[in-house]
Image (spheres, helix red, strand yellow):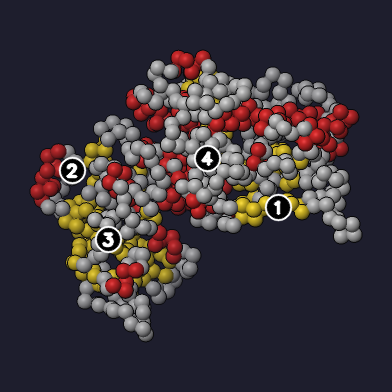
Amino acid sequence: MRYTPGAEQPLCVYCSAIFPLQAIPRPTRINHYATVGDLISAAGETSCALCAVIQQRWPLDEMRQHFPHDTEADLHGLLLELRLHSGIQPAHPEPEQGAELTPVPMGSTTLHGFLHSIKHDARRAIWLVIVTYSGTGELAAVDDGRPSRLVLGEDIVQGNGSDCVKYAALSHCWGTKLPLKTTRERLAGLSLVIPGCDGQWCGTPDQIPRTFREAIDICRTLGLKYIWIDSLCIVQDDPDEWRLEAARMKDVYSNAWLTIAAADAQSSAEGCFVDCSCEVTNSAGANLQQVVRFDIGNPSPGSGGIRSEGGPHGASERGTKVLHVRVYHKPLGHRTKSSALSQRGWALQEHVLSSRIIHCTFPELHWQCTSTYMTEAGVEMFANDLEKGYMKTIRELETGNDRQPLEEVVHRAWCLWMNQYSSRRFTCASDQLVALSGVMQRTAEATGYTHLLCCWEETMCHDLAWINDSPKERVDDGHVLPQIPSWSWLSRTKNVNINSWYTSLSTAKPYRAVERVELVDKHIVWDGVPLVSNLLCAELLLMGPMRKIRLTTTPEARSYDPPYLNVDGDIRNWSAEKPIPWRCAGGFDEPPVGGEYRFPNDTYDCLLLRTMYTVPIKSYQREDFLILELVPSSTMDERMANGTSQPFPGPCAPCYRRIGIACLNTEPGDKAYFADAEDTLLRLI
C-alpha cells in the first residue's frame, strides 16, 4: 500500500510502538521485522502505512541489479535494521508524486536503516529512509540556489540561481585516465543524453565511468533527482568557465543535500563500491585499513542459543540471532582519513564544507552529519578530541560545540585540516590555493578572522610556527607555487605540521602562550579574484624580539627529527651518562639539495614568535623562534621594480626570508634566552 497524506491509516505493532515520539539523543535500534521477507509478508496483512513507506524507500531494486543471480528467496532473506534518532535532519522539500511523507522542518526525529546481505558483502547497503513527523511546513534544500549545471536522470540541465532544489554532489578521484567529461564540443550532445546513465551499464569508453553510474543509482534510490559531478557539470576546456566555477565550488558542496564520497576508489572506473576482490594494497598502501568480518550463529543444541524476537539481526533460522563481528586493525575514526580519496587535494574542501556525507568505504558505508558519525555495522563515533577522531566538517564544529569558544575550536580544526592538506596530491600545482578557497571563506565566517595565505591575522604567531614533518624528503619543484612567501607553509607544500609544538603541550600540563610578534602591516596583492588568480605580492611587516644565535649540530643529534642543536658556546656532546642533554631542537624548511639535507652550522638572525611556560608556577619555559636570512638590498631593489614588493609607510625596515624554525627550552631558574633581545621592525617575504 502507499501512504496517502491526510488519511488515517493503520500501523503494525512494531511501528505503533514508535509513537508517541520521544527525545532520543543517540541513534537507537528499534524492534522490527528481522528480514525483508518478514516485512513483506506481514505488510500484506497489517496494511501498515509506515511499513509501506519503508518498502518504497529501501534499495531492493538496486540489490537485484547488483546481484542478478540471487533468487527472490535470497532477497527476502536480507536483514533489515532500523534506528530512531532525535537530531537535526531535514525532510524532503520536494516529494515526488505519491510521496509518503509530508515535508517538515529541521529538529525532528529520524528513522533510518539499511538492508544487510549475509551472502554478499554489506557494502551495497543504503541508508534508505528519513522520516520526520514533528511540525509542518517546507524546508528549502539550499540557501543560494543550485549550481550552474546538474545531472538530471540521463542528461545535463542548466541551473537557475533562483531555484532551490535538492541535489547530491559527488566527491571522487579522477585517476590517471580521465573520465567522460564535458567539453565545448560535447556540451550540446551531453545535454540531450549522457551515455550509460540508464539501462544496462557496460563500462565502455563512450559511457560514464562506474563511479558516476553508481552515484546516480544511489541518488535514484534515495529519491534525489539531481547530482553534481565536476567533470560533467563544468566545461573542462573553457578556462574562463573553469575559473568561475572553481571559485563557486564551495557553494556546490555547502548547498548539496548530500555528498557521496567514493572513498576507496582510486579512479572513476572503480566505482563507489570497491569490489571485495580488489587489491587493497594500492598506492595509498598501508593507509587502507584492513577489516575482518565473521559471523557466529546457529549454536549447537544445548549451548544456549541467543533468542531473537524479530530483531534486526535475525538469522535464517527463526528464533536464532546471528552475531556479526568486525575487527578493525586501526582506530576506526581514522578510516576515512586514510582512504584513497583522502590523498586528493580537492577532496578536503568537498568534505569539510558538506552537511551530510555517505562515505563509500571498503567494506561498509560510513554516515556523517552534524549530529553523528556512524558505520554501517552500527558503531557510532564521538570525536570530542579533534586529533584522535574522524575529520569533522565545519557545520559539525558550529553545531556541536558548547564548551570552548567557537573561534578556538575552528582554528584548531583548521590546523588539523591543513596538516592533512599539505600531504595531498594535485594534478595541477596551481590548484592548491583554489581548492582551499571555500574552506578559507567558511573558516573566516565562523571565526571572524582575516585570512593571510593560510595564516590568520588574529593567530599569526601560532600560524607562523609550522614545521616540516619530513624535512629530509625532497619536494618536486614543479609543485611549489610561484610568489608564495617563505613565511607561509605553502612554500613547503608537503607534510607540514601547523602549530605542532603548541598543541602537543596541552595534553601534559597547563601551559600559557605569550605571543611576542606583532603584525604591523601586510601586502597581499592578486591580479584578480583572490586565491583563484595570480599572486603578485605577499609580505608582512612585523615587530618582535630579534637576536643573533649560533646554531650547530653533532652527528648524534642529526638522527632526530627535528635534529637537536647546540646554542652559541653551549656545546653539548653525546655521552653514556647523559645521551640527550640538548635543550634546542629545530632545522631548515628547505628540502635537500642534491639529495643531501643541510643542517644549521652558522650564526643566524632569529625572531622570537612566542614564549610558553607552565601555569600557575613557571617551572618550565620554552621559546619558539624563526631562523631568518637577510635579503640583499639589490634583491629588494629588483622586487620593488617588478612589483613583487611594495613600500610600507614609515621607516624602511630590513627584509628577511624565513629559512627554518627552532624551539629552546629554558631550565628552571635560568633566564629566558630572548630576555635581552631588542624589538625590531622587519619585513618578511
Q: Is residue 402 above or below residue 668?
A: above
574 relative position to 425: left or right: left
Tell me which numbered mark, 2 or 4, is placed earlier along the sequence.
4
The quarter of the picture where residue 344 lies is top left
Q: Residue at x 46, y 64 (%)?
A: 506
Q: Count the marks.
A: 4
Amino acid carrying label 1: it is: Phe
Q: In the rendering, at what x and y percent does residue 349 appear? A: 45, 40
- Residue that badge 4 annotates: 265
Tell me which numbered mark, 2 or 1, is placed earlier along the sequence.
1
Crowd band around label 2 with a 10 angstrom C-alpha radius: few (<14), some (14–19), many (20+): many
Q: In the rendering, at what x and y percent does residue 142 appear? A: 54, 29
- Residue that badge 2 annotates: 645
Real-space Cα distance between discs 3 and 4? 36 Å
Q: In the rendering, at what x and y percent does residue 365 appear? A: 62, 42
- Given residues 155 and 283, the one toward you in this image is 283
What secondary structure is marked by label 1?
A: strand
Q: Residue at x 41, y 64 (%)?
A: 512
Q: Are marks 3 and 1 in contact (CB under 8 Å)?
A: no
Q: Is residue 494 above or below residue 553?
A: above
- Residue that badge 1 annotates: 294
Q: Is residue 501 above or below residue 89?
A: below
Q: Marks 3 and 1: which is nearer the front? A: 1
- Given residues 439 and 543, the one toward you in this image is 439
Crowd band around label 1 with a 10 angstrom C-alpha radius: few (<14), some (14–19), many (20+): few
- Residue that badge 3 annotates: 597
Q: Residue furthest bottom?
A: 577
Q: Residue at x 62, y 23 (%)?
A: 200
What secondary structure is marked by label 4?
A: loop
The quarter of the picture where residue 305 lies is bottom right
